[in-house]
Image (cartoon, grey):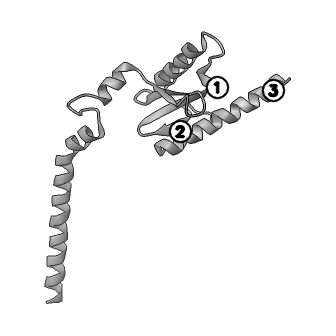
């Protein structure tokens, strides 16, 4: 029979492994003790592990969602999502986020996507490249005048 302390330490280890796994998978970093466990791709993820997705109580999921909502309120402008993993391939990690964020990320016009962001940024990047090319040409002209 295992005591509660040993069970909690096993749960913490599983939770930490999940945090590092999510960070590695999404190319992010782990934020121990911060609002959200992992920061990646413009989101902070609160990570929770439950073997076989079996919750300890009927309140557990709502508690997690309230926790994420509090993080969102304390960190305006930061996107938060919940990751729940049940262990193994049979219970893959799931991401839970609010529907407004999902809608923004999946708009048909691409407004919330990386492509939409780059399309909006393209005219400014193009202008910047043109300025740099002009400066490069001016520098080359000055150097050729000095060398003559």
Residue at position x 43%, y 24% from top? 97
Few, some or many residues within 10 Å of mark 3 (<14, 14–19, 20+)? few
Q: Is residue 81 left or right of residue 145?
A: right
Q: Are marks 1 and 2 in contact (CB under 8 Å)?
A: no
Q: Quadrant of residue 30?
A: top right
Is tag 3's residue or tag 2's residue first in the polypeptide sequence? 3
Q: Nearer the viewer, mark 3 or mark 1?
A: 1
* Rendered position, 2 above or below 89: above
Q: Are marks 3 and 2 in contact (CB under 8 Å)?
A: no
Look at mark 1 in the image and give the residue it sits on. 51
Where's residue 59, x and y in %?
60, 10
Where's residue 39, x and y in %?
49, 38
Where's residue 5, x and y in %?
81, 26
Residue at position x 70%, y 36% from top? 13
Where's residue 7, x and y in %?
77, 27
What is the secondary structure assignment of the residue under circle 1? helix
Judge by depth and name the residue closer to the eye, 36 or 50: 50
Q: CA distance from mark 1 to mark 2?
A: 17 Å
In the orientation shown, which residue stands out farthest toward the front? Answer: 90
Judge by depth and name the residue closer to the eye, 120 or 106: 106
Residue at position x 61%, y 24% from top? 52
Look at mark 3 in the image and give the residue it sits on. 5
Look at mark 2 in the image and give the residue it sits on. 22
């Amino acid at each position: 029979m295992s005591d509660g302390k040993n069970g909690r330490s096993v749960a913490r280890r599983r939770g930490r492994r999940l945090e590092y796994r999510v960070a590695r998978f999404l190319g992010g970093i782990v934020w121990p003790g911060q609002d959200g466990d992992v920061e990646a791709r413009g989101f902070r993820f609160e990570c929770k592990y439950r073997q076989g997705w079996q919750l300890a109580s009927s309140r557990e999921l709502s508690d997690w969602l309230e926790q994420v909502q509090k993080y969102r309120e304390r960190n305006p402008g930061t996107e938060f999502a919940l990751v729940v993993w049940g262990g193994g391939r049979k219970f893959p990690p799931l991401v839970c986020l609010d529907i407004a964020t999902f809608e923004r990320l999946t708009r048909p016009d691409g407004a919330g996507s990386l492509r939409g962001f780059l399309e909006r940024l393209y005219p400014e990047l193009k202008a910047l490249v043109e300025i740099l090319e002009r400066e490069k040409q001016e520098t080359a002209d000055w150097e050729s005048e000095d060398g003559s």
